[in-house]
Image (cartoon, helix red, strand yellow):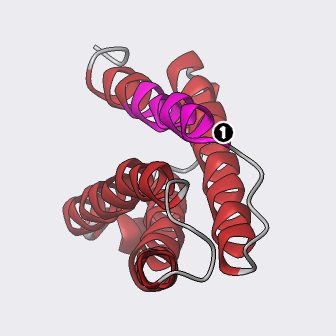
Amino acid sequence: MSDLLGEYRQVLLALHIISFIAWMAGMLYLPRLFVYHTTADAGSEMSETFKIMERRLLKAIMAPAMIATWLFGLLLFAAADFSQMQQWWMLVKLVCVVALSGFHGLFAASVRRFAEDENTKDQKFFRMINEAPTLLMIAIVFLVMVAPY
């Protein structure tokens, strides 16, 4: 199987990067929507509009992109015969991706809380939490592009 995957490594890598970019676009935009949503009164037209935007971003873009990122990443990993797992940078990258997935879960929970008009966090919280995916993205890119060389 790894031979077959190896033949398509460049395609898998391209799909992995495209998926990651789409996922990160949502991970950077959704908390920004939360910042603005905190200023809208519950039940207002603006609040209802934010609910639609947040749900669609999460369900139509972020979730499929996260799944695709994991899928193509695992296929790339399998194509490498798991040899990369012995390298420190790959372990750190994996930890960062797991952390990013955790923030995805936190954001999904926030979408649910906003949808039920039960959000208790203020805009300062969402402004601060918005930085975590950015820092993880920077770490992931540097680990992949610099550490192996």
Main SS of the magenta part reads helix
Using residue 72 as the reference point, say whether residue 102 is left or right of it.
right
Vertical arrangement, residue 116 with respect to residue 27, above or below: below
**Residue 1 visible at all:** no
Q: Secondary structure at mark 1?
A: helix
Q: Tell me which amino acid carries mark 1.
A: Ala
The residue tagged 1 is 99
| Nearest the eye: 17 or 131 | 131
| Nearest the eye: 123 or 6 | 123
Q: Is residue 72 magenta?
A: no
Q: Residue at x 27, y 55 (%)?
A: 21
| Nearest the eye: 82 or 17 | 17
Q: Give neighbour class at mark 1: few <14, some 14-19, many 20+ (Cα, 10 Å).
A: some
Vertical arrangement, residue 43 with respect to residue 6, above or below: below
**Residue 145 visible at all:** yes
Q: Residue at x 70, y 48 (%)?
A: 102
Using residue 82 as the reference point, say whether residue 66 is left or right of it.
left
Vertical arrangement, residue 7 with respect to residue 43, above or below: above
**Which segment is the magenta one?**
122-137
Q: Residue at x 52, y 74 (%)?
A: 63
Q: Is residue 136 magenta?
A: yes
Vertical arrangement, residue 135 with respect to residue 97, above or below: above
Image x and y of residue 7, in percent: 26, 68
